[in-house]
Amino acid sequence: MRKCALLTLLVLLHWPGAFAQLVVMPSVAGDRCRLSPSAMPRHEEGAGSTVDFSLNAVSFARSRYPELRGQGVTICLKENAPDPTDIDLRGRLLPSAVASSVVTPHATQMAEIIAGVGNSSLLNEGIAPKASLVPASFSSLLPEADAFYTRNRVTVVNHSYGTDIENFYGAEALAYDASIFRLPTILHVFSAGNLGYASPPAGIYANLPAVATLTGNFKMAKNSLVVGAVDAGGNLLASSSRGPAYDGRLKPELVAYSDEGSSGAAALTSGVSALLQQAYTSPGFHPQTSIGPPNASAALLKAVLINSADDRGSPGPDYQTGYGSVNAFAAVKTIAEQRYLEGIVTAGGHFEAVIRVPAARQLKITLVWTDPPASLNSPKALINDLDLTVSDGDTSYRPWVLNPAPNVDSLGKLPVRMRDTLNNAEQVTLDLPAPGQYTIRVNGTQMATGSQTFAVAYQWDPTNTFYWTTPNTTTPAVSDTTLTIRWKNTTPARYGTLDFSPDRGQSWIRVRDSVLLVTGAMTWRTPALLTTGLLRMRIADSVYRSDSFLLSPVPSPTVLYACADSLAVAWTTVADGKPVGLHNLYRLADGDSTWHKTAVLIGNRTVIKGVWPGDRWAVAPVSPAGGVGIRSEPFGSDQVFCYYRTFTADLVDGFIRVRCELSTTEGVADVTFQKQTAQSMQQLKTQPVIPTMVFYSLTDSLLQEGPNTYRLQIRLKNGAAIYPDVATAYVVRKIPFLLYPNPVETGQMLTVRTEESGVYALQLIDETGRVVRSCSVTGTAGNLSTAGLSAGVYTCVIFKDNQRVQTGKVVVR
């Protein structure tokens, strides 16, 4: 086993690209080598259906630091490929030789959460919409070659996927620790997984319920970040995988919002990490005396994210929610106010720094370092053991440490203050610290290397403060819906009174008495208005106003028809019980990435002339005061056809049902069903169009063997006629298999159909008995090419399970 471990470690440290084809890694038992983690099944870990950037204060950070949009940051998206034609991602994806060839909605949604530009909806703009994205396939579960990251200037890598539960320090965990150790400015963010309810099959926590369920050996790495999922109330999803790591380390370190699976939580954290990276390198944020590299280290980003998190679950760190829920605003504020330290400690040496703390509700300090990789299958991953202490001059405080003993009771205990010998992240908190100076000390207690770099982040929550986080200036609120409003409160008061103003504070409407402040959030049914709103919380004699925010209905457009020269659309937008009469019309040209206003419309419908197929359009309500509301979802000419949505013909119980669905009845006089005969189109039935009815149908019982082809005529009131594409149903009654056309022109495809689905073999035999063509038929239909065949009569033989089931003649001419 030692030879296997040594070989792998040497390859990882000195030959990072070597694992493209073959990887040596330990078995779960650790008593032999086994091959290829790339053979492990991998799966996307839940896409989710909604985006909520309020719980993690992303929208609040955006309102307070609008200059942070991800400029200059490149994020690697390691999984399947996002859709490059998606209107939120156009022009955002960098070329990549290691990208997956499989495009999935999951990958597209992860990319949109991280860096989408919000063309699909103002409510769905990504966290870092000006960042660049470079895809990399997860066909390999190992990190990319160093050159890939450096060439693309990657500083954040998102991993929203998992495999089985694997609790050991294998080749993948080792590879990521080694990669980050070599490239210390790249933060890898992993989803925790969706097996929170399971039990691990092996390791020291084997068979314990809902414990150590992280999905993938790569999530055992110590230098990366693992993120679990919570709902909009901050409660851990039952499916979210839990820690500890295989050796008792704290995993996941953080949680974030996702309504389904932990994938979205990781993507959200990756987006916030991009904002932190930009803030660190931007003028006005970056300290002039920094000893660090141009980009923030992964250790610093981890320290800031962990230290600024909002505690969830049981008090202090725990194995379910880690250090708490990501708080984007507090994290960016830490960088903006330069409340962090970066340093180096030698073996047996120490580092000290003094900070001055005002009156605060809590002081929080977190130490993180990027540790050298351990040996393969090591029972303990930590190599260099640093120790954090915080002193107020009289008392020295150690970090909070969890009990990693392998039983459910121990793992559920609250943390205690003691020296941490497992983790490369340590945190000290002090409740109600006395104002004054505090000394942060980092000791190089046990080190295998001569020195170790580290990062420390610190913050304090001032006492007796209240501020709103949601809604805010950059996040519109949808009218007549349930909205979660959020705030931060450190006042001693228990209750407050909530009011709403629809007119910028000229008048106020009571929303609720006795709001419980400690919850930090409540749901509110927004009024059906198009206006600029305000909220205020009255606490004793103090009044706290929110930002002014847009309150708007969202138009719901319906495309009436999309013909060659025009597109007609109607929509409904209601505010204060009345239809909104004025709207802006916007166009997103095919291939463009920015919406452009093209017209101001009166009423609730329009006809757009000169439509290109790839164009997208949207409308937004305009208030009487001139404010513009929330833009509708995009619509285009590909959503319907020219006056119809569908036209189909289906064989049902011995007859053919022909159906059409009109996209609108406006201007339509009647519809006529026609059938193709040998000579012409035969009129079958004409039906006058009723304004309230869009579905029309015909039942045909006079069927012919083979294809039965139908055409629909839509006649408009102005006399014009529209003909959709034909619809065909096939009838096979006299013989098991139908071959057509017969005769067939040389080069034309010969089609075979059967009523009984199966797997068949078809052979075409010439007059000498030679098989000149063959093909397989799976299901009920298949095609055989006649290209290159000479004119003549051929025998067609069809086999099933090596048994001949039909023989016939085919004429090629």
Image (tube, rainbow, N blue to C red):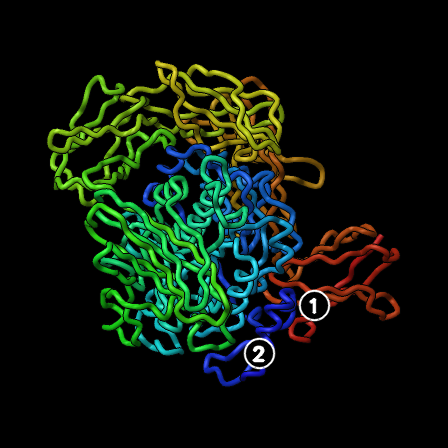
Q: Residues within 10 Å of mark 1 (few under 14, many from 20)?
A: some
Question: At label 2, which amino acid type do we have?
Answer: Leu
362 left or right of 699 in image: left
Q: How many marks?
A: 2
Q: Looking at the picture, does residue 621 appear above or below residue 5?
A: above
Circle 2 sits in a helix, a strand or a loop, which is it? helix
Residue depicted at 50% across the width and 49% down the height: 291
Residue depicted at 50% across the width and 67% down the height: 450
Q: Which marked residue is nearer to the observer: mark 1 or mark 2?
A: 2
Quadrant (top left, top right, bottom left, bottom right) of the N terminus: bottom right
Residue 13 visible (yes or no): yes
Residue 375 lies, in percent from the top left, at: 51, 75
Q: Looking at the picture, does residue 215 appear above or below residue 665?
A: below
- The quarter holding residue 439 reads bottom left
Q: Residues within 10 Å of mark 2 (few under 14, many from 20)?
A: few
Residue 214 lies, in percent from the top left, at: 40, 66
Question: At label 1, which amino acid type do we have?
Answer: Ala
Identify which residue, 281 or 664, lies in the foreground.
281
Disc 1 or 2, which lies upstream in sequence?
2
Residue 263 lies, in percent from the top left, at: 43, 54
Identify which residue, 374 or 701, lies in the foreground.
374
Q: Looking at the picture, does residue 228 appear above or below residue 197?
A: above
Identify which residue, 743 or 582, lies in the foreground.
582
Residue 651 visible (yes or no): no
Residue depicted at 42% across the width and 25% down the height: 571
- The quarter holding residue 272 reads top left
Judging by the rendered image, the residue that carries numbered circle 2 is 6
Residue 71 lies, in percent from the top left, at: 53, 38
Q: Which mark is residue 184?
A: none
Circle 1 sits in a helix, a strand or a loop, which is it? strand
Q: Label 1 vs label 2: CA separation?
A: 54 Å
Judging by the rendered image, the residue that carries numbered circle 1 is 761
